[in-house]
Image (tube, rainbow, N blue to C red):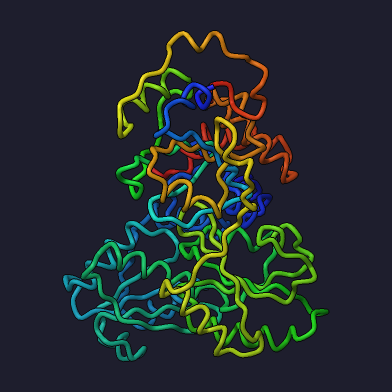
């Protein structure tokens, strides 16, 4: 849902990686447990920020607004309108 | 206490390192600075109940010290106030692995031909000596721990469930693994090459022989029986395990050594798992990033990227409650690797009640 909510926000990408089938050897990225959520700011990809807040859509949005390189707006009321069933692959909020 | 080694022995450790379990704080160990074998725990108790560094004042005492302990180290100094002696005393307070003693007795120094500031380490395998230098305290402590540990076990170890405890609890987090067994063609030559080649770096990397019947370990390196014989390096110094594969001649000690030396110098690139990126990866609202597409889609992109690293066996439906998820993941993880569920119970009990009682006060 977070992904859908932000499709209109072009400069923010929401992504996921199955780390049991993919591995990275990039300085600054140390995945010690699952799930780990990292934020890579556009301006400084070398220093990702570990997301430690609630895994809940509004918390994500607030976090992204704070850290994003450009300000953006999302419709607040969109949350209730979304289909609940089309995102089996995604976690509830993403 | 009896169950502590049992719990860990049951876990296939390379497999665990390849797929790090959920970060559950309670599964980490208490600060016994050493291994978890019966011998380690006995050493720990002996050290914590007496002085960490005993003082020896005659040749007889020194002989008795080495006779009593199958693996023990003696520091030889000209003064107990010398920097090296003070460094060893500080180290002894922090390390629980081996019985340590010191002496300033000239007769002992003469008997063992040890210069002032040297350390004599006796193991069933032989006698090893080195100079002590604690100028860079922290680095020196770590280096000394690895030196002692590297010399305390054979330069080439046959992997077994019993041994894994000793191998994984030590301070050396780099393992050079030679897959193969008696039935493998060229096995003898490979063993000789690994022993000679990797033995030179025994204080930095453990050399371990793994039979091809250890299919789970093979799987952790994405190998099958058909790939054996094979030499790989498992680097577990960071959080998850990194894999390096030897492609040279398995019978040449020089090539094995060069491989290990290159690795230690940081010249080798780890082999990374990656699925093949597909066009539909980037179609959905949540983009699917793979190992090979990470650089282009995340690092080289001009967007802000929020990315979740997940494991398929960690159900997304539990993500809302991270703690529940961790318990669930741990359950699935243990279940997946056929670890009896009662051990989960153990691990919680251990973490909450038994482990603290291992700390000596």
Look at 47% across and 57% down and name the residue there.
A25
Image quadrant occupied by the C terminus of chain B: top left
Q: Is residue B26 visible?
A: no
* Residue nearer the viewer, B5 or A6: A6
Rendered view: B237 above or below A28: below
Look at 46% across and 84% down and name the residue there.
B127
Rendered view: B203 above or below B30: below
Look at 57% across and 48% down and name the residue there.
B290
* Residue nearer the viewer, B59 or B259: B259
Look at 66% across and 40% down and name the residue there.
B333
Give left or right: position of B55 versus B360.
Answer: left
Give left or right: position of B115 versus A7.
Answer: left
Image quadrant occupied by the N terminus of chain B: top right
**Residue B3 rendering spot, x and y as whole percentages:** 63, 45
Total numbered labels = 0
Rendered view: B214 above or below A58: below
Q: Based on the displayed image, in which of its 4 quarters is residue A12 positioned?
A: top left
**Residue A92 rendering spot, x and y as whole percentages:** 58, 21
Q: Based on the displayed image, in which of its 4 quarters is residue B21 positioned?
A: top right
* Residue nearer the viewer, B200 or B276: B276
**Residue B355 rendering spot, x and y as whole percentages:** 50, 40
Q: Is residue B145 visible?
A: yes
Q: From this viewpoint, which residue is outermost toward the right?
A: B183
* Residue nearer the viewer, B17 or B164: B17
**Residue B126 rendering spot, x and y as whole percentages:** 51, 84
Rendered view: B259 above or below B161: below
């Amino acid at each position: 849902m977070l992904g859908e909510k932000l499709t209109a926000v072009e400069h923010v990408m929401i992504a996921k990686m199955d780390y049991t089938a993919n591995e990275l050897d990039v300085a600054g990225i140390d995945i010690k447990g699952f799930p780990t959520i990292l934020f890579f700011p556009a301006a400084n990809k070398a220093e990702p920020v570990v997301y430690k807040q609630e895994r809940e859509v509004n918390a994500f949005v607030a976090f992204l607004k704070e850290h994003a390189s450009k300000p953006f707006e999302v419709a607040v009321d969109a949350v209730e309108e979304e289909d609940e069933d089309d995102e089996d692959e995604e976690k509830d909020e993403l | 206490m009896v169950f502590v080694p049992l719990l860990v022995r049951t876990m296939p450790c390379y497999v665990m390192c390849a797929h790090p379990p959920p970060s559950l704080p309670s599964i980490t160990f208490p600060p016994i600075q050493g291994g978890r074998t019966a011998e380690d725990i006995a050493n720990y108790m002996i050290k914590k109940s007496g002085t960490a560094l005993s003082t020896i004042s005659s040749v007889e005492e020194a002989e008795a010290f080495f006779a009593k302990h199958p693996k023990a180290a003696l520091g030889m100094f000209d003064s107990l106030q010398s920097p090296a002696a003070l460094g060893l005393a500080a180290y002894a307070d922090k390390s629980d692995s081996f019985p340590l003693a010191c002496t300033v007795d000239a007769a002992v120094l003469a008997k063992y031909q040890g210069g002032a500031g040297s350390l004599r380490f006796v193991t069933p395998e032989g006698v090893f000596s080195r100079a002590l230098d604690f100028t860079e305290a922290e680095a020196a402590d770590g280096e000394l721990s690895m030196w002692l540990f590297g010399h305390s076990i054979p330069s080439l170890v046959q992997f077994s469930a019993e041994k894994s405890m000793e191998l994984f609890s030590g301070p050396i987090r780099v393992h050079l693994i030679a897959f193969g067994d008696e039935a493998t063609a060229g096995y003898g030559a490979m063993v000789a090459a690994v022993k000679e080649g990797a033995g030179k770096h025994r204080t930095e990397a453990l050399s371990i022989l793994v039979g091809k019947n250890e299919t789970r370990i093979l799987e952790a390196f994405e190998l099958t029986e058909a790939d054996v014989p094979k030499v790989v390096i498992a680097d577990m110094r960071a959080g998850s395990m990194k894999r390096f594969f030897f492609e040279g001649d398995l019978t040449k000690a020089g090539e094995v050594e060069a491989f290990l030396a290159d690795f230690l110098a940081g010249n080798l690139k780890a082999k990374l798992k990656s699925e093949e990126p597909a066009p539909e990866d980037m179609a959905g609202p949540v983009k699917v990033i793979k190992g090979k597409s990470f650089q282009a889609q995340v690092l080289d992109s001009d967007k802000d990227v929020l990315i979740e690293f997940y494991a398929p066996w960690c159900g997304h439906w539990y993500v809302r409650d991270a703690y529940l998820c961790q318990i669930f993941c741990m359950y699935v993880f243990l279940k997946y690797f056929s670890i009896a569920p009662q051990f989960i119970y153990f691990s919680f009990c251990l973490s909450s009640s038994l482990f603290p009682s291992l700390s000596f006060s």
